[in-house]
């Protein structure tokens, strides 16, 4: 089992398959994705398989495929199928903005997808367009409905909390869960290299959401060992659940159970680390054993906590770089 010097065990890999995103979310890429003239050399299907096998050898049970927007990789169904077939990998998930979800979710399901995370920052079509730059809320919701009809039971909806954009919609989101068997996750806005002013204007403390939920009778849920960072709650009168992700809360990093591989093959011990560690040479040669040994050595360099409280976001300029 992969374990760092603080006793944290890592069952969960977030693997980015592209940096590119086609949304223009005001908290991430307000000007859209900016690329240079060169074609990005993202990890190939074969290289992704080598990384997945190495982490599986080390005890990883869950792989989440992220971006940018992972649906922009045409071979995403092949990536899902490859990860799903690796011995030891029990769950394969995808995080998406859902822009073309109705037309692709069947292929993801057929490939073996276990879980789906979809970003919906507003249930109001006009506000959704304002935040994301796209009038596609109807498509995203249709995609979730299609996923449910296919039998995908683990569906989470992510909403980044924004003081001036969606904070007044909290009750609408909660009411939506009356008849929606999904987990809605309110995520505190995080400061990155290029959003300092926006962060100061828009940050909402998730503690206020938790206080509201407890007052309304929502009850905490005990985390599983491969769960993400959300504090989750359930209510007997609602089909859906609610999670709150509070990266600025005390001891947030104490239960960290996930590592990240970028779309270029760099290991990130923390989302807000100062740099990624290039491991692509091992993936290119296909040496699973040597890659696993390198990861094991490097895990000792994982720090006890990020430094977001001090305004330090490491190398992360925007969350599209590693999918959050």
Image (cartoon, rainbow, N blue to C red):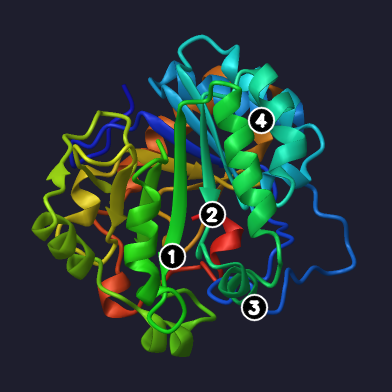
Q: Nearer the viewer, mark 2 or mark 4?
A: 2
| Image position, residue 58 (x, y; %) | 41, 21
Residue at the location (39% across, 41% down)?
A: 179
Q: Circle 2: is it few (<14), some (14-19), or many (20+) Cα within 10 Å? A: some
Of the image marks 1 and 3, the number of the one nearer the N terminus? 3
Q: Nearer the viewer, mark 3 or mark 4?
A: 3
Residue 207: quarter of image: bottom left
The answer to which of 25 and 268 lies nearer the viewer is 25
Q: In this figure, which residue is indicated by the disc labeled 3?
A: 30
Q: Report helix, strand or loop for mark 3.
A: loop
Q: Nearer the viewer, mark 1 or mark 4?
A: 1
Q: In this figure, which residue is indicated by the disc labeled 2?
A: 119
Of the image marks 3 and 4, the number of the one nearer the N terminus? 3
Q: Nearer the viewer, mark 1 or mark 3?
A: 1
Residue at the location (25% across, 66% down)?
A: 206
Against 312, residue 263 (above or below) is above
| Image position, residue 12 (x, y; %) | 40, 33
**Mark 2 near mark 1, Cβ–Cβ under 8 Å?**
yes
Label 2 – label 1 distance at C-alpha: 8 Å
| Image position, residue 236 (x, y; %) | 19, 37
Q: Report helix, strand or loop for mark 4.
A: helix
**Mark 1 near mark 4, Cβ–Cβ under 8 Å?**
no
């Amino acid at each position: 089992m992969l374990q760092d010097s603080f006793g944290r065990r890592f069952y969960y890999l977030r693997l980015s398959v592209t940096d590119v995103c086609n949304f223009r979310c005001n908290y991430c890429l307000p000007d859209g994705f900016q690329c240079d003239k060169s074609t990005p050399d993202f990890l190939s299907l074969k290289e992704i398989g080598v990384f997945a096998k190495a982490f599986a050898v080390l005890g990883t049970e869950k792989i989440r495929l992220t971006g940018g927007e992972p649906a922009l990789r045409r071979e995403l169904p092949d990536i899902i199928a490859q990860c799903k077939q690796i011995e030891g990998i029990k769950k394969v998930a995808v995080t998406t903005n859902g822009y073309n979800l109705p037309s692709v979710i069947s292929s993801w399901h057929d490939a073996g997808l276990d879980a789906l995370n979809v970003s919906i920052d507003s249930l109001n079509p006009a506000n959704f367009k304002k935040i994301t730059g796209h009038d596609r809320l109807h498509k995203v919701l249709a995609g979730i409905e299609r996923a449910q009809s296919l039998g995908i039971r683990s569906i989470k909806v992510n909403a980044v909390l924004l003081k001036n954009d969606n904070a007044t919609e909290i009750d609408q989101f909660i009411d939506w869960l009356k008849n929606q068997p999904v987990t809605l996750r309110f995520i505190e806005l995080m400061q990155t290299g290029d959003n300092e002013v926006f962060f100061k204007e828009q940050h909402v403390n998730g503690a206020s959401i938790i206080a509201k939920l407890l007052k309304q009778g929502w009850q905490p849920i005990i985390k599983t060992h491969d769960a993400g960072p959300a504090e989750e709650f359930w209510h007997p009168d609602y089909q859906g659940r609610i999670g709150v992700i509070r990266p600025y809360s005390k001891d947030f990093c104490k239960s960290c159970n996930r590592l990240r591989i970028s779309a270029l093959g760099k290991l990130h011990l923390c989302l807000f680390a100062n740099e990624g560690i290039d491991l692509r040479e091992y993936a290119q040669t296909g040496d699973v054993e040597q890659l696993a040994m390198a990861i094991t050595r490097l895990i000792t360099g994982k720090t006890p906590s990020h430094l977001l409280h001090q305004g330090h976001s490491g190398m992360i300029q925007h969350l599209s770089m590693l999918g959050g």
